Image (tube, rainbow, N blue to C red):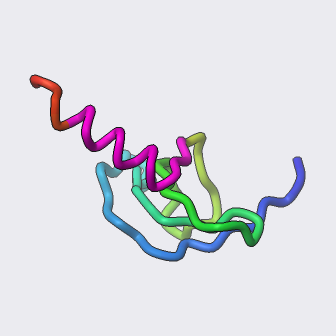
Amino acid sequence: MANIKFEIIKNIGTLSESSKGWMKELNLISWNDREPKYDLRDWDPEHEKMGKGVTLTKEELEKLKELLGEMEL
């Protein structure tokens, strides 16, 4: 697998923590020196390993926020 360069620009928050210490976080991340995007995924405590996740533009995140606001839980 090719090396992926990333820089966590801003940690928005943590949604949960697994029994192994991995955290599900929402971050603003620059992938391979590109424009930062919002990213939701699991990270190990040192932010060296990551799980699969979802990357969203600002517009996609705004739409998701709108959809979540309309949901009944």
Does residue 7 lie above or below 40 as drawn?
Answer: below
Expressed as whole percent of the image width and height from the top left, the position of residue 12 reads: 35, 66
Farthest left residue in view = 72
Which residue is painted at 30% across and 49% down in the image? 16
Expressed as whole percent of the image width and height from the top left, the position of residue 42 reads: 49, 49
Give whichever of 40, 70 is nearer the camera: 70
21 with respect to 5 (left or right): left
Give whichever of 18, 11 is nearer the camera: 11
Does residue 36 lie above or below 41 as drawn?
Answer: below
The span shown in magenta is 54-68
SS assignment for the magenta stretch, majority: helix
Does residue 25 lie above or below 51 as drawn?
Answer: below
Farthest top residue in view = 72
Expressed as whole percent of the image width and height from the top left, the position of residue 27 reads: 45, 62
Asked whether 66 falls inside the magenta stretch, the response is yes
Give the position of the C terminus as an image quadrant: top left
54 with respect to 67 (left or right): right
Expressed as whole percent of the image width and height from the top left, the position of residue 58 reads: 45, 55
Which residue is painted at 71% across and 67% down in the image? 34
Give whichever of 16, 8 is nearer the camera: 8
Instruction: Count up the numbered dots.
Output: 0
Asked whether 30 falls inside the magenta stretch, the response is no
Which residue is painted at 53% across and 42% down in the image? 54
